[in-house]
Amino acid sequence: MSRQHEGGCLCGAVRYRISEPAKFSSICHCRSCQRATGSPVSGFVGVTADHFTVLTGNIALYESSPGVRRGFCRQCGTSLTYEGNRWPDEVHIYTATLDDPRVLPPSVHTMTVDSIPWFITEDDLTEKTGFGSAP
Ligand SMILES: [Zn+2]
Ligand SMILES: [Zn+2]
């Protein structure tokens, strides 16, 4: 059986599980993620939709731009998921909501065109000015 990882929101109302393999692990610098989370960057792990299971609670959806649905806990506001028509049958979970966010480290920075200059990332990861295959 493939490795599985659980995660959830700040208040604990929403719990989920993902199964490997992950399609990608990325760090997104885009403006929408900055606004949605209040943070300079957002880590994402992408899995196929059948590798994502909500265990408890309900994920509320907000359409942040046409064809993009951001999932969050209605109770505590934690950002949990990202789904886009551009990536059909995929769910991208916010990496830091995993119980152990260390398990699936990122390999790429995306949307660096929106990077905030005072947030310095010094690592060897690939940098993409756009999305590439991962948001
Ligand atoms: Zn919550
Ligand atoms: Zn983003």
Image (cartoon, helix red, strand yellow):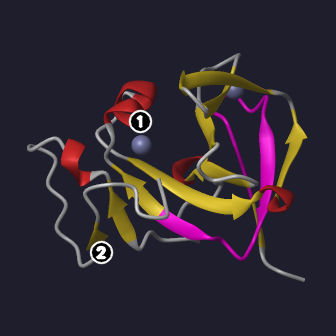
The answer to whether 2 is drawn above or below residue 109 in the figure is below
Residue at image coords 65%, 71%? 22
Q: Is residue 11 magenta?
A: yes
Give the total of numbered labels: 2
Tag 1 residue: 33
Name the spot of residue 58 as percent of width and height, x first. Answer: 83, 27
Q: CB of residue at label 1: within 8 Å of ligand 2?
A: yes
The structure residue drawn at horizontal position 45% and vertical position 27%, both measured from the top left corner, is: 36
Q: Where is residue 62 in the image (x, y as percent from the top left)?
A: 62, 21
Viewed as shown, does residue 5 lie left or right of 83?
right
As drawn, is 97 to the left or to the right of 128? right
Q: Which residue is drawn at 34% across and 35% down?
A: 39
Q: What stretch is highlighted in magenta?
A: 6-25
Say what amino acid the circle numbered 2 marks: Leu
Residue pictured at 63% horizontal, 31% vertical? 69
- Residue 6 drawn at (x, y percent): 76, 56
Instruction: Look at the image and tell me in which quarter the N terminus lies.
Output: bottom right
- Residue 125's label in the rendered image is 2
Horizontal relation, residue 5 to residue 117: left or right = right
Q: Is residue 104 magenta?
A: no
Quadrant assignment for ligand 2 = top left
